[in-house]
Amino acid sequence: VKGGFDSFMDKEIHDQPKAVADTLLGRTDEKGALVLDELRIPETVLRSIDKIIVIACGTAAYSGHVAKYAIEHWCRIPVEVELAHEFRYRDPILTPRTLVVAISQSGETMDTLMAVRHAREQGAYVLAIVNTHGSTIPRESDAVLYTHAGPEVAVASTKAFLAQITACYLLGLYLAQLRGTKFPDELRETLRELQELPPKIQQVLDGEGYVREVAQAMKDEPSFLFLGRHVGYPVALEGALKLKEIAYIHAEGFAAGELKHGPIALIEEGQPVFVVVPSPRGRDQLHSKIVSNIQEVRARGARTLVIAEEGDEAVVPYADIIFRVPQTATLMSPLVAVVPLQIFASELAKAKGLDVDQPRNLAKSVTVE
Ligand code: F6R
């Protein structure tokens, strides 16, 4: 069942190229335009949307956090991302022009389900992005876009996360196509970048041996910090969550820009810090900003574990360890950058002799509040 892997989590990490490819499959026509007829949301509704609110919990919420950067950029629609349990106890501002996107692997998470009900009661349109067919959340939503990750067994979510980002990107590109906020050429190019990801994810998996070696050597560390900017920020949060939940190690993710506003006080001699570095080919200053952040923590004694693109030499002087990922457009980078973090957590948990698939105190789907 585990396909020759030590754990379901390892198997599912290795399923990721297929999870992304399958989620993309059959969603374009012969001209390369996106077809999401399956949504069955009237085009008039999709054209009139003036706000998107993503509701989800845990890893699913981080996928929404990644998608916010992309959808706002492509569609010029404001996107809020809210934890379902916070959303449902607020008095959120929803109108018939609000599209609520509920993301869930299981389709059964109680908090997310309650938030869906809360949103619909107030007249919002609810689209579910869900992995499990026949589950409750899609049944109670107005529309559903399935992720095709296949069954996820390990408690720690991996392939569902990549599939969720992929599905959110399809939604964003579809809205951009429909609303004309991106030129058709640009849309095709972005879609092509997305379609090129499965072999790039595979490339990261092919290099997993080094990540595992480093993880084994660090199994007795009491704490890890994770830094990222832009889409690298939710990747940092996800890397920290993986380490907490399966290796029981204190781990915290920060937006790198927050360092000086507090977290930098935590840095002392030997503190391991993961840094998710964006592409040096991006148009903005993201890359140089984060290189300065690596320097800053290094100067205070941190041991830096850097996730960087192949060919990015600027990080070399400040990195103790470099995990290389293939070159991608900035918005595509989470789909490769998170993979070494998943492998690291899995290997470290294994090195500590823990049950990687069934961590203590956790359930695969949280059907209670
Ligand atoms: C983390 C993890 C949880 C889930 C969260 C939402 O690895 O598995 O944080 O992501 O409980 O679950 P779903 O997606 O089933 O709603």
Image (cartoon, rainbow, N blue to C red):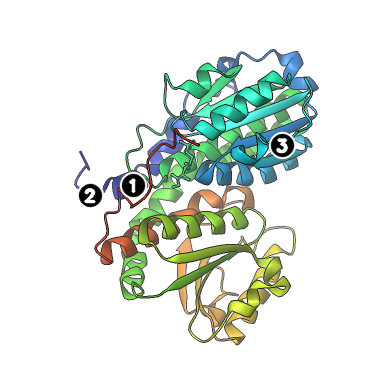
- Tell me the element at label 3: loop
Q: Amino acid at mark 3?
A: Arg
Location of residue 259 in the rendering, given as x and y in whole percent from the top left corner: 67, 72
Distance Cα–Cα, label 1 vs label 3: 39 Å
- As drawn, is 217 to the left or to the right of 110? left
- Marks 1 and 2: CB-CB under 8 Å? yes
Q: Amino acid at mark 2?
A: Phe
Q: Is mark 1 within 8 Å of ligand 1?
A: no
- Asked if 241 appears above or below 132 in the picture, the reply is below
Q: Which mark is residue 99?
A: none
Question: In the image, what residue occupies the spot 50% across and 42% down?
Answer: 196
Label 3 vs 2, first from the N-terminus: 2
Distance Cα–Cα, label 1 vs label 2: 9 Å
Q: Nearer the viewer, residue 216 or 115?
A: 115
Query: According to the image, label 1 marks what residue?
Result: 14
Neighbour class for label 1 at 10 Å: few (<14), some, many (≥20)?
Answer: many
Count how many numbered circles sit on residues in the image.
3
- Marks 3 and 2: CB-CB under 8 Å? no
- Asked if 92 appears above or below 62 in the picture, the reply is above
Question: In the image, what residue occupies the spot 64% across and 79% down?
Answer: 265
Location of residue 302 in the rendering, given as x and y in whole percent from the top left corner: 53, 81
- Asked if 58 appears above or below 320 in the picture, the reply is above
Query: According to the image, label 3 marks what residue?
Result: 90
Location of residue 233 in the rendering, given as x and y in whole percent from the top left corner: 62, 57
In what quadrant of the picture does the N terminus appear? top left
Neighbour class for label 2 at 10 Å: few (<14), some, many (≥20)?
Answer: few
Query: According to the image, label 2 marks what residue?
Result: 5
